[in-house]
Amino acid sequence: MKVLHLLKTAVGASWALRQTRELIKLGVEVHLALPDGPMVEKYRSQGVKVHILQTALNIKKPWANIKLFRQFRQLVADVQPDIIHSHFVATTLTMRLALGRNHPIPRIFHVPGPLHLEHGLFRRVDLWTASKADYWLASCEWTRQCYLKNGIDSERLGLAYYGVDVEAHHGQNKGKLHQEFDIPDDAPVIGNIAYFYPPKKYLGQKRGLKGHEDLIDAVDLVARQRPDLHCIFVGGPWGDSQDYFDSVKAYAAQKHHGRFIFTGTRHDVQDIYAELDVAIHPSHSENVGGAVESLLSGVATITSNVGGFPDLIKPDQTGWLVPKADPKALADAIADALANPEKRQQFAAQGYELAAYLLNVKNNAGDIARYYQALLSEHALSPRTNQESHCETSA
């Protein structure tokens, strides 16, 4: 079986490297179209057949798409894949528009997150440009349900998470943060590890996508009773959003309770997770996000109730789930977690078991390979849901 994957970036996106690596182990001949960049040689080293081409639709220069579509059609003619597998909205639109509605090769849009589905215009563009050759792989249950509610037949829709190497998420508590930022050993430490994404004003957003401002507000509330509370923000601005990053730091500096520490981008994330009492992911839109990292690092986890977070965070089982953009509810969850260390330990252990099964890249690659086979044999694939996974994990 020969599959052509489409990526819009060769910077980061390590999830794609893991996925293609495991698919090759399962006997899939993987071709990959992406722009030149630092990840290219890593793909080649894993046996991926790389084709240098930026396949993302050019919105700012629509006339440039004429050449892009021609190049893409030539690539498909040269590779002659059995399936085309796209991982971004922009690459999916190129795939569909360049090949047209009657092209015979099956095309999969592996949906990386729910953001475009949460907004009517972008959701309709996805649905309107699809034809009988198009199929979808959701990467969380929310996304799968959204497509079903919007009329996509279950036989055209699968579920496959973007997995991780479970064994790579075991850090050691070396006390780095405590030493570097002079944090007392007995002080409670919570943290968020994420890039800073500015609000998208054209989507009506007033706060950043990752909910950093909500966490600052919540810490200010909790620290009125726990004045020694420390909140660590690990991560820098995404792209050219330095102004937004600075504005978030300025917002935290205005608060009178709690201590806020911004470390910028770090490369010792697993060791940092090991130092946290609680990991917080208060995103306004998300797939499974950083929750899988904190759970696999053995850290008690609080998330907002959005996107794929509920696939991993089960209230009173694997963590705390709170409404998005609700600092008071978030503060209550933080206070409860800090006040109950045994509960933190229990939830973290149970969360690890669920994440280790549900997000294991070997399992996820198997899900995708089965979907390929089902698609080519015209049989529907029953998705491996988180409920089924949890039952198997608990057995």
Image (cartoon, rainbow, N blue to C red):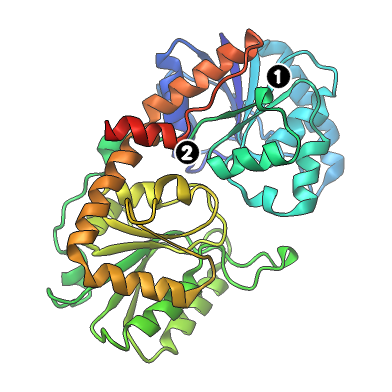
In which quadrant of the rendered view does residue 4 lie? top right
Choose mark 1 or mark 2, whichever is in front.
1
Residues 199 and 139: in front is: 139
Kind of residue at disc 1: Leu
For the C terminus, the quadrant is: top left
Could you say which disc has been placed on residue 199 in the image? none
Q: Is any atom of residue 32 visible in this view?
A: yes
Q: Is residue 298 visible?
A: no
The residue under the point 56% across, 11% down is: 373
Residue 360, given in percent of the width and then of the height, sits at 36, 32
> Looking at the image, is mark 1 or mark 2 earlier in the sequence?
2
1 shown above or below 259: above
Per the image, the residue denoted by label 1 is: 75
Position of residue 333 measured from the top left corner of the image (x, y, whole percent)? 36, 69
How far apart are labels 1 and 2 at the CA level? 22 Å
Q: Amino acid at mark 2?
A: Pro
Q: Position of residue 90 (x, y in %)?
A: 70, 40
Q: Residues within 10 Å of mark 1 (few under 14, many from 20)?
A: some
* In the depicted structure, whether residue 262 falls above or below residue 362: below
Q: Which residue does the image show at 63% across and 7% down from the upper left? A: 377
How dense is the environment of label 2, judged by Cα within 10 Å: few (below 14), some, or many (20 and up)?
A: few
Give the vertical position of 309 relative to 156 (above or below): below
Residue 336 image position (x, y, % from top left): 30, 71
Under tag 1, what secondary structure?
A: helix
Residue 30 in the figure: left or right of residue 312: right
Quadrant into which the N terminus falls: top right
Check residue 38 in the rendering and tell me which mark sits there, or answer none: 2
| For the residues bearing labels 1 and 2, Cβ distance under 8 angstroms | no
